[in-house]
Image (cartoon, rainbow, N blue to C red):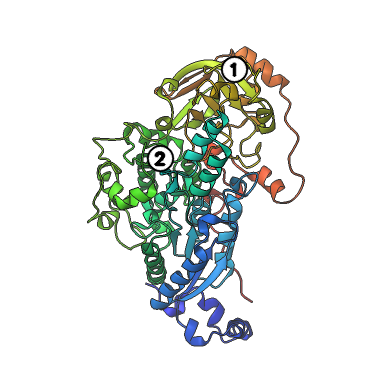
Amino acid sequence: MKNPDSLRSARWFAPDDLRGFGHRSRIMQMGYGPQDWAGKPVIAIINTWSDINPCHAHFKQRVEDVKRGVLQAGGFPLELPALSLAEQYVKPSTMLYRNMLAMDTEELIRCHPVDGAVLMGGCDKTTPALLMGATSAGVPAIYLPAGPMLRGNWEGKTLGSGSDAWKYWDERRAGNITPVQWLGIEGGIARSHGHCMTMGTASTMTAIAEALGMTLPGASSIPAADANHIRMSAETGRRIVDMVWEDLTPAKVQTTAAFRNAIVVAMAMGCSTNAIIHVVAQARRAGCDISLDDFERASRKIPVIANVRPSGDKYLMEDFYYAGGLRALMSELKEYLDLNVLTITGKTLRENLADAQVYNKDVIRSVSNPIYAEGSLAVLKGNLAPNGCVIKPAACEKRLLKHTGKALVFDNYPDMKAHINRADLDVTPDHILILRNVGPQGGPGMPEWGMIPIPQKLIEQGVRDMLRISDARMSGTSYGACILHVAPEAYIGGPLGLVKTGDSISVDVAARTIHLDVSDDELAVRRAAYQPPEPRYERGYGWMFTRHIQQADIGCDFDFLQTSFGKTAGEPDIF
């Protein structure tokens, strides 16, 4: 247990010297007095609110609720704004800036007089970024999820963010939706603040944060517009103060066993494909040995039991909350979980799940009555993806889970966009669409371009799914037979860059294989003729990004930020 003299913030505020005078006088300049900070934990509230981030629109108020909780528990709250990664608006991809937010978070904590941190996020990349940064900073930290928005509605139909956008866009392309109807869908699909209410990347990653033990029990399921979210925010503020006195740091919670629990939960939820990249990156920051193999092992034995779109066929996150939320889902998975892991409550996972119940057995199924018998994701390997690639079998047409077809190659996104809707495009439903040079470096930043559109001529024929392969990612709200995260990416000379239109490719999800049916001798000839592309950046953050970003199979972190590079950056000197 800590005492007031051992608080990290005391290094700034306690010394009776000129530097201590400067710190105390400047905080008094803002209207505070010694009774506000003396002997109290200073709590940084890392807030990713901005005017352009609809997922976090309520954070302007929620930060006040967190402050209320901190004050009630005897702490001193200070809001520190951080980079806000609005998934819908940041181009070319928020993934380009995930590591920047992680650095922002780590350095905000390290350079300020902070004893503990509340991490406010929810929009896709904010959850892993905040947790990565706080893990590296090493002070007690607790995550506050933004919560999902309310269900969408249009003409009496329930709409799910992302998933129904893709669905109805294809119907509009087919001429089945009018412009007036489309405007109604635009206005009805996102009706409140909060992140996507489908089981996309946002809901996946906040659930993973809870499964890791980094949130209050049940926190990730509460809809953003629910009054329980306000109460949870205040309780989060109260809890972080106690965590400081207990010195309960992320290192004590984020163990290898906790990450394996999180993978089990992700599989059972029908998680976003993006979960693999983020969880591997988070684990490596925590010094835990987690890889694609852990996801593959889990995918073989963990069924999908959350009936939430897009893997499920009916429900959304609001329904999931009413059915009991993540605690209820985890209670159905006890046989697969390590229940003895410590969580930020100071209690074990077993204790946190003690009274959890399922209130709707169609929304949260039992292990014996799953939505999909195996896990949400599958990791494929072969000569086209030596280091692995990912598919979401539960969201595909079953006919495509074992398929051989001819490749139709697009070298970049503009190339694909220019040709995909041509009436004379030589394509059939059995073709395999390839989009390459859109990975971590090629994108740059690995944008969510992996859900390649179905060609217009096939849409008009009624085709709604076909096999697609890319070194990009796709939105977690997407669906379809999309093989993603091909590693190594084409842009750095990976085998995907050697594919030619007309080549035969064979995919067998059950066998976990992906194979380019071209001889090794022919591939050697193509590799010898390969010309690397010109560098994308000559200065700034992009220059740093392309020189230090790692590949998808190991999490797309910067090499110099991983634990193996150096365990700590040390405490700042105060002279």
Residue 321 versus residue 383 in the image, above or below: below
Instruction: Give the residue number, with chain letter if any, for mark 1.
Output: 427
Residue 68 versus residue 195 in the image, above or below: below
Tag count = 2
Q: Residue at 66% x, 36% y: name it.
A: 442
Q: Is residue 338 visible?
A: no
Q: Using the image, tell me which numbered label, if any, was put on residue 175.
A: none
Q: Quadrant of the N terminus?
A: bottom left
Identify the element where label 1 is drawn: loop
Three-letter amino acid code at the position of disc 1: Val
Marks 1/2: CA–CA distance: 29 Å
Label 1: few (<14), some or many (≥20) within 10 Å? Answer: some
Label 2: few (<14), some or many (≥20) within 10 Å? Answer: many
Q: Earlier in the sequence, mark 1 or mark 2?
A: 2
Q: Is residue 360 visible?
A: yes
The residue lying toward the viewer, choosing from 502 and 169, is 169
Q: Position of residue 90 (x, y in %)?
A: 63, 49
Q: Quadrant of the C terminus?
A: bottom right
Q: Position of residue 512 (x, y in %)?
A: 43, 25
Whether residue 186 sits left or right of residue 437 in the image: it is: left
Q: Quadrant of residue 219?
A: bottom left
The residue lying toward the viewer, choosing from 568 and 161, is 161
Residue 38 versus residue 312 in the image, above or below: below
Q: Using the image, tell me which numbered label, if any, was put on residue 309.
A: 2
Q: Residue at 45% x, 31% y: name it.
A: 379
Three-letter amino acid code at the position of disc 2: Arg
Identify the element where label 2 is drawn: loop
Q: Position of residue 109 (x, y in %)?
A: 55, 65
Residue 154 versus residue 228 in the image, above or below: above
The residue lying toward the viewer, choosing from 120 and 59, is 59
Q: Position of residue 559 (x, y in %)?
A: 60, 46
